[in-house]
Image: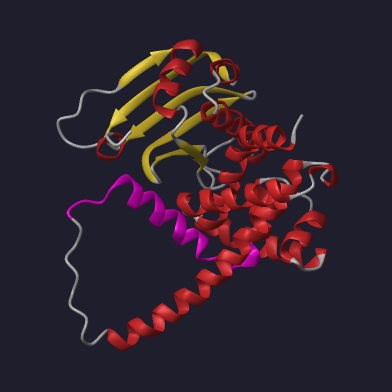
């Protein structure tokens, strides 16, 4: 396999996972996609014979890029806060938005949780608690001793638990495995792989937001549900998981959230999918 073919194969196999990982740290799907694009550009410039595990290598590089971006964003945010304090006496009062979109609601909730964590805490927590990476590898990404990374993850775990109570009996590890298979299958338009992660008796229901919308649409059976999902979530959409402990997937198009999917899982398969769609965003697809 040529170097280009190897990178292309890695893109198909690992990009959905890496975008999801970056999103958990950055809270912005556009920034996550940009970071992963940069990670793959660096991979393309490497001598691939020196890389034993491209997924692990890309994970470390993506984590470092996210950490750099978070540290830079924190500096910019603090500078902006100082400037806004100087302008507060003369700034005109802003008009409220005409409506709050699904994207606004989800992003606000996620960022509120992420702001509780420092960049180091966020990276250590996401890599270890969400993506099951050992602390020895996290230490390489963060550039701190293993013991310090454990402390960062422990502090983040406490803050995160206070902010987001669990609503699912499925373990984080099981949720991650099932969600990754689902996301990768959708990203590659792979009907067979998507059907394999659905229970044969699965059913899905889709609800549109807003006035004058049709009643919820329901599909039954793994094939019908999978075909309908790929119609809306196939190539062109970006899927990421919601906060840890929440059985939720977020679907973006052109970096704008257009659907939230709540999953019910059992024995490693998805039994039910409840989708809420924002028609104003979905119309751009």
Please report the residue visible at 54 percent of the width from the left and 59 percent of the height from the top: 162
* Residue 106 is covered by the magenta coloring: yes
Pinpoint residue 123: horizontal percent, then vertical percent. Answer: 64, 59
Q: Quadrant of the C terminus?
A: top left
Can residue 122 be seen here? The reply is no
* Residue 284 is covered by the magenta coloring: no
Please report the residue visible at 39 percent of the width from the left and 49 percent of the height from the top: 106
In the figure, 3 relative to 202: above or below?
Answer: below
Q: What's drawn in magenta, residue-wise?
A: 98-121
In the figure, 202 relative to 38: above or below?
Answer: above
Pinpoint residue 111: horizontal percent, then vertical percent. Answer: 45, 59
Pinpoint residue 125: horizontal percent, then vertical percent. Answer: 66, 56
Please report the residue visible at 16 percent of the width from the left and 35 percent of the height from the top: 211
Q: Tell me if 128 is positioned left or right of 163 in this view.
A: right
Pinpoint residue 178: horizontal percent, then vertical percent. Answer: 61, 30
Q: Which quadrant of the view contains residue 131?
A: top right
Using the image as rendered, state which of residue 52 and residue 264 is in the foreground: 52
């Amino acid at each position: 396999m040529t170097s280009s073919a190897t990178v292309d194969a890695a893109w198909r196999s690992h990009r959905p996972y890496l975008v999801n990982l970056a999103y958990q740290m950055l809270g912005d799907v556009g920034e996550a996609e940009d970071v992963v694009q940069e990670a793959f550009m660096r991979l393309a410039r490497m001598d691939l014979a020196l890389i034993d595990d491209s997924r692990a290598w890309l994970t470390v590089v993506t984590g470092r890029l996210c950490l750099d971006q978070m540290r830079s964003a924190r500096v910019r945010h603090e500078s902006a806060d100082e400037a806004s304090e100087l302008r507060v006496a003369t700034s005109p009062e802003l008009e409220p938005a005409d409506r709050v979109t699904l994207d606004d609601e989800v992003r606000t909730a996620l960022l509120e949780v992420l702001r509780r964590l420092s960049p180091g805490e966020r990276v250590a927590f996401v890599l270890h608690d969400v993506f099951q990476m050992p602390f020895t590898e996290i230490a390489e990404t963060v550039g701190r001793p293993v013991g310090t990374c454990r402390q960062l993850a422990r502090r983040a775990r406490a803050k995160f638990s206070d902010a987001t109570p669990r609503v699912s009996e499925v373990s984080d590890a099981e949720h991650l495995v099932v969600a990754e298979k689902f996301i990768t299958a959708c990203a590659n338009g792979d009907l067979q792989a998507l059907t394999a992660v659905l229970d044969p008796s699965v059913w899905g229901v889709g609800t549109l937001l807003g006035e004058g919308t049709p009643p919820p649409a329901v599909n039954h059976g793994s094939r019908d549900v999978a075909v309908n999902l790929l119609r809306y979530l196939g190539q062109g959409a970006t899927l990421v998981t919601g906060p840890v402990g929440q059985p939720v997937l977020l679907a973006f198009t052109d970096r704008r959230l257009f659907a939230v999917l709540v999953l019910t899982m059992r024995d490693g398969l998805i039994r039910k999918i409840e989708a809420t769609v924002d028609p104003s965003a979905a119309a751009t697809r």
